[in-house]
Amino acid sequence: MTKIISLLFILLITLFNVGCKEADELKALIDKDDKNEPVNEKNEPPTAEELQDEIRLVAQQIDETIGTATCTNSNQCGALAVGHKACGGPASFLAYSTENTDTTKLFDLASKHQALSKSYNQAIGAMSDCAMVMQPVMACIDNICQKQAP
């Protein structure tokens, strides 16, 4: 019973401390995660050219991380969303294998690629056809993960 009361007391103190934060401080914490905008060495938003260079570099890192998407069965195959269309959503999908890929690193790189692509699209005022790119079904074909024919 004493443990329960102690835990409730700690929970109430924690909630009280969070509740006492200024609204601006809480909004700043929330907004911090939403911005995720890249910046250059001058702490300014990067130019479209700098974004394009960074997109190429991250795409190369994604390709290197995926390597040859070898597999022994289709359960090891996944579709990685990359890029960002001007209207939203991924620009395309790449096949990868969970068998030989550091998926944590791969997903981090994909998130970075999407954020950079979104920033680039905004920087150049890009427009797109707004067609939704559907996630393909990946399959292990000849021991390589690839898009399955419809």
Image (cartoon, helix red, strand yellow):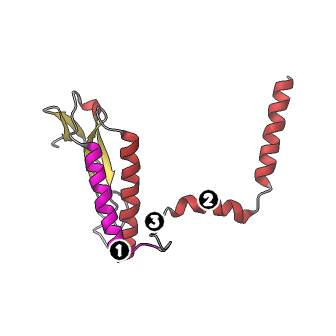
Q: CA distance from mark 3 to mark 1?
A: 12 Å
Identify the magenta region.
45-66
Corner quadrant of residue 102: top left
Q: Secondary structure at mark 1?
A: helix
Question: Badge 2 is on which residue?
Answer: 30
Q: CA distance from mark 2 to mark 1?
A: 27 Å
Q: Between residues 67 and 3, which one lies in front from this camera angle?
A: 67
Magenta span includes 48: yes
Q: Between residues 80 and 59, which one lies in front from this camera angle?
A: 59
Question: Is residue 48 toward the left or the right of residue 137 in the image?
Answer: right
| Residue 125 in view | no
Magenta span includes 112: no
Q: Position of residue 118 (x, y in %)?
A: 39, 65
Residue count near mark 1 (Cα–Cα under 10 Å), binned few <14, some 14–19, many ≥20: some
Q: Residue at x 32, y 73 (%)?
A: 49
The overriding secondary structure of the stretch rendered in magenta is helix
Q: Secondary structure at mark 2?
A: helix
Q: Residue at x 30, y 59 (%)?
A: 57
Question: Badge 3 is on which residue?
Answer: 38
Corner quadrant of residue 86: bottom left
Q: Position of residue 78 (x, y in %)?
A: 30, 40
Question: Badge 1 is on which residue?
Answer: 48
Question: Is residue 126 toward the left or the right of residue 67 in the image?
Answer: right
Looking at the rendering, in which quadrant would you find the N terminus?
top right
Q: Amino acid at mark 3?
A: Pro
Corner quadrant of residue 58: bottom left
Callouts 2 and 1 close, C-beta under 8 Å: no
Q: Which mark is residue 147?
A: none
Disc tally is 3
Q: Residue at x 30, y 50 (%)?
A: 62
